[in-house]
Image: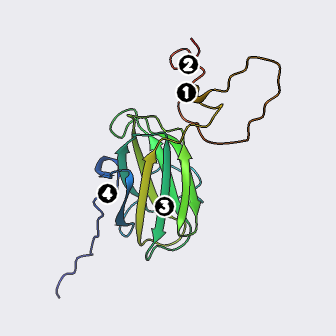
Amino acid sequence: SPSSTALNITVANDDCSNAQTVTPDGTCVTGTTAGANDNWQGTVGCQSGNNHADVWYTFIATGSSLSVNVTAGTLTGNIEFVLASASGPCTGLLIAGSLCGSSPLSGSIQGLQVGTRYYYTISSSATEGTFTTCVNNTNPTPTSGQDCSVAAILCNSNTFSQSTSNQGYSTQEVNPTNSCWG
């Protein structure tokens, strides 16, 4: 009788060491988790459980804010986007943020460090399938009173107010190595 061989489908960016390099300027790339493995140990970020096939992408941060958009093609269930910083190629991975939800998944992650390599994975809480991912790495616009270059001047006892804002969140400015307090 003829022998049969199981069809093994592999995905090129199935693990960290083969992460696909992306340009974080809003350019979109298509991908698939079909045939991929779960490479995270345990549940990370906002993932809903273990054994979710993931694919890997990488970029060098050029700004402190990352805007994310992932749209499912044939991928079903909640999309799981996990971002990690790295101290070296696929070493010292630290979770920097995650976004999970239905397609299209959109959101932002703040506090990226310029010049640092980041990796992100895309997986699903349900079935494997195709998707499109777009990331845009920028610096938020300075907000008066929250950034050194546009600091609020306090020279008298007059009251002032500052609205709540996430703008200016990135490099912590109140520390000895990065301070406008001189």
- Distance between mark 3 and mark 4 Cα atoms: 19 Å
Please name the residue that numbered disc 3 is placed on: 69
Please name the residue that numbered disc 4 is placed on: 13
- Earlier sequence position, callout 3 versus callout 4: 4
Q: Which mark lies nearer to you, 2 or 1?
A: 1
Q: Nearer the viewer, residue 62 or 101?
A: 62
Q: Are marks 4 and 1 in contact (CB under 8 Å)?
A: no
Q: What element carries label 2?
A: loop
Amino acid marked by disc 4 = Asn
Q: Is residue 26 left or right of residue 158?
A: left
Amino acid marked by disc 2 = Cys
Point out which mark residue 61 bears: none
- Distance between mark 1 and mark 3 Cα atoms: 31 Å
Point out which mark residue 149 bears: 1
- Distance between mark 2 and mark 1 Cα atoms: 8 Å
Q: Are marks 2 and 1 in contact (CB under 8 Å)?
A: yes
Point out which mark residue 180 bears: 2
Q: Which of 174 and 93 is in front in this view?
A: 174
